[in-house]
Image (spheres, rainbow, N blue to C red):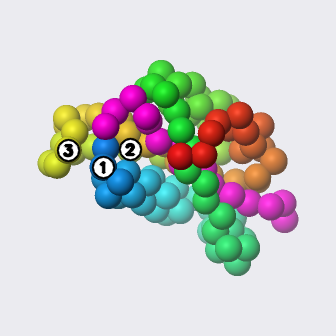
Amino acid sequence: MANLKQVILVRTDIKMSKGKVAAQVAHAAVNCALTVNKKLLKNWQSSGMKKITLKVESLEDMYKFQELAESKDLVNSLITDAGHTEIAPGTQTVLAIGPGPEELINKITGDLKVY
């Protein structure tokens, strides 16, 4: 099996505290883990569940990466906040891609900077 990883893209154009970002990242990571096929999940778990958080500058950028992920049949999860704490209801905050083949995910997100 190929090396596996997950990336979570965090919007930098909205202001979120570190705790809020952590919660949004967790929502996305868990949602993808719950929807990926069981064999891939098991392989990802046994290899250390590699995750990387990356920066995106806008919602439009996030949509672009989601479209690219979907075109490669990579599981992804775009998180929409309920608006109970820091940001307006309906704000889309983070996008998780994977777990999936690291090489394939790198082709899509390899130029982004670490969050």
Q: In x, y percent, where is residue 16? A: 31, 44
50 displayed left or right of 88: right
Determine whether label 1 and label 3 are within 8 Å by CB: yes
The earlier-in-sequence mark between 3 and 2 is 2
Query: Please, what is the three-letter code of the amino acid marked with disc 3?
Result: Glu
Judge by depth and name the residue closer to the eye, 29 or 52. 52
Q: Is residue 16 above or below residue 58?
A: below
Placement of 68 over or under 30, stated as above or below: above
Q: Amino acid at mark 1?
A: Ser
Q: Which residues are magenta?
A: 1-15
Residue holding disc 2: 79
Q: CA distance from mark 1 to mark 3?
A: 8 Å
Q: Residue furthest left?
A: 84
- Residue designated by label 1: 17
Disc nearer the start of the sequence (2/1): 1
Task: Give the residue at mark 3.
Answer: 86
Question: Is-magenta flag for residue 9?
Answer: yes
Q: Residue at x 39, y 29 (%)?
A: 13
* Residue 59, picture quadrant: top left
x, y percentage for residue 34? Answer: 49, 63
Q: Residue furthest right?
A: 1
Q: Nearer the viewer, mark 1 or mark 3?
A: 1
Spatial CA span between label 3 and label 2 = 15 Å
Could you tell me which secondary element the residue under label 3 belongs to? loop
Q: Are marks 3 and 2 in contact (CB under 8 Å)?
A: no
In the image, residue 115 lies in the stretch drawn in magenta? no
Comparing marks 3 and 2, which lies closer to the viewer?
3
